[in-house]
Image: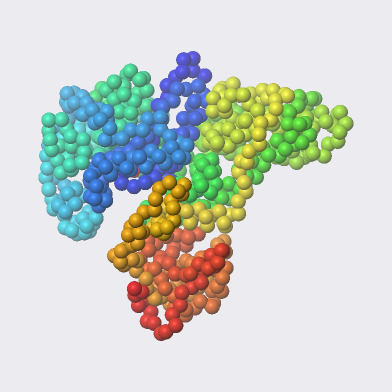
Amino acid sequence: MPEKKEKFYLTTPIYYTNGLPHIGHTYTTIVADVIRRYKRMRGYDVVMTTGTDEHGVNVERAAKKAGVAESEFVAKMADAWRALWDELGIPADEFVRTTDLQHVRTVQWLFRQCKENGYVYKGNYTGLYCIYDNAFVNEPKPGNLCPDCDRPLETVTEENYFFKLSTFQKPLLDFYRKNPDFIQPETRKNEIISFVEGGLKDLSITRTTIRWGIPVPGEEPHVFYVWFDALTAYLSAVGGPEYEKRGYWPADLHLVGKDIIRFHTVYWPAFLMAAMLPVPKQVWAHGWFLMDAAKMSKSKGNVVLPRPIVNMLGMDALRYFLLREVVFGQDGNFSYDALVTRYNSDLANGLGNLASRTAALIEKNFAGKILKPGARQPQDEALAKEAQAAIGDVLENYDKLSFARALETIWSVIGAADKYLTSEQPWALGNSEDEQAREGTILWTTAELLRIVTALAYPVLPESAAKVWSLLGQPVAVGKFELDGLRWGQLVPATALGKAQTLFPRVDKTEAVERIEAMANEELNPTPAVPVPAATPIAGGAASAAPAASEKIGIEDFAKVEMRVGQIKTAERIVGADKLLKLTVDIGTEIRQICAGIAQYYEPESLIGRKVAVVVNLAPRKLRGVESNGMIVAASVGPEGRPVLTGFHEEVEVGARLK
Ligand code: ME8
């Protein structure tokens, strides 16, 4: 435990605002939150920064498409990012926006320092440029075409400021040697060292062809180009030029995905060295969460969103799964099935069951009071020894960011306690004084073990750990408990149990996955709000109903929905999804695969050849992992919403449009 609270500063990447957070971004922010909570339990004064990277061509374009000013666009997006982190219980201590005045000042100041020290010069940058999108293109399509608009690119030269990255090859290699833990994990370190050994080119750090950026003072129309701007946000967040006053710089840890490690371990230390500023202590690059073995992207329709999972299973379940399933640093596949399986086995049947079993027995047989343990038997000693050993092991693994190992150890102790209860059978003991004393000892032992695993699990499972902690009647909030003082044997007898709260109700896997997927689909492709009938008062009755005209949609809105006559060619059930059928449907121009939630009402064979109405211009989505490209129209009948397919009583041509 540090004497005076030692400071610990950690960051997530400063995320782009041209999209909203998915599970990948959530992963990095969760990890940062786990470290923050853990370090606080070890006595550190911790600041965690996250934020939004708001400049550049992509934002210019997105704002234009949305028909709003860039500043308005990014303000809304930054609010949405911040609100989601708050909602998920992983709020930033410092939320930095690259449009903040403090950040603008810091970037301009850093640039001046680099320039005064002789590391910046003016030169010409030549590259392939799209005159329609007003942007340089790094990776053109074959034939030098713009990857966004397919138009031919032109070779354009513009005046830029360059940073003398080339002069930092030796200083960087020396720095890596002297600070062997700077780049983590080891494999990434080797990659970066060989990259730097291969030679470094000077870096263009300003642009004159981009409008939406931080101006280079006195050098308009120069604006700073992406990385010089974005990386500096870590410093702006804790004081910028006055960083010494707050005392959090240099950062102890930058957490990033492997995609951006080079910027953090080559450019960033070089910028700071050039400005004679302290360099961060460590950059940790984790791997990718993949969906169906591919990187997530909205256009592929394979994005996993955090909110539906949290709504269904709770935030702790998501945190536990992400940290337990994949070794930190490596890539991992995300699957809803694996998520729910782990939830049921490790959380509901594991920690949840141990807590409720122990509490129920103490409640029933000892009026909710933890008894004083009597003479200990070898099996009690063995369990105590295992839990005590786990403390050191778990702390060591948290320190190394080996979260999966830390959780594995905690859960093996939970497993041992389960076995202990099953073999000791406290519920079968009688009422004699000896037997009661034995039962008291067994339950004290289990409750003490529960206290230890709860304290250790808190950084990953803050909500549920707080519940178990108060169930055990502990006086200090679990997050404030000092882990350095955690020892077997501290559970005070006669402590009265607190109120039991549900931790992890078991869920039906198929149903849970279907519900998560339905919520995710709704979030990605929201159904337009159902118009409120004119006479319906708004909830609460105070507001008057909107005028009738605004409740109707215009023909142009209806025209956006393209419906065609389709003919079902094949139909089959989907394993593990008892409500869904996988269909192939001829829509005149092509054969589409479409999933329909009609399996409980239609036999697949009865559908072959049937003509139905199909919405053909819906964005593709995945249902239970199966791609669905369109929607079959059905009436929803009765209180249970039984689907009844539309039909045609006259001969209609496949592909005919419904108007
Ligand atoms: O790169 N799996 O922002 P960004 C795991 N603005 N992590 C993932 C992930 C996935 N599938 N997808 C994203 C930028 N991430 C710059 C950063 S920093 C000064 C500027 C996480 O919005 C991971 O941490 O593209 C990755 O590095 C980051 O999101 C990229 O976020």
Q: Residue 12: x, y in percent?
A: 39, 35
Looking at the image, residue 353 sits to the left or right of residue 618; the answer is: right
Q: Residue 581: x, y in percent?
A: 51, 68
Looking at the image, residue 570 sits to the left or right of residue 94; the answer is: right
Image-quadrant location for residue 354: top right
Which residue is located at x 31 percent, y 35 percent? 97
Which residue is located at x 32 percent, y 59 percent? 549
Which residue is located at x 16 percent, y 58 percent? 152
Q: Residue 252: x, y in percent?
A: 40, 27
Q: Is residue 363 visible?
A: yes
Q: Nearer the viewer, residue 119 or 196?
A: 119
* Image height of 526 relative to 81, above or below: below
Q: Looking at the rendering, in which quadrant would you find the C terminus?
A: bottom left
Q: Nearer the viewer, residue 434 or 619?
A: 619
Looking at the image, residue 648 sits to the left or right of residue 139; the answer is: right
| Quarter of the rendered image showing ligand 1 | top left
Image-quadrant location for residue 445: top right
Q: Is residue 296 visible?
A: no
Q: Residue 410: x, y in percent?
A: 60, 35
Image-quadrant location for residue 424: top right
* Image height of 159 relative to 141, above or below: above
- Tell me, what colour scheme is on the image? rainbow
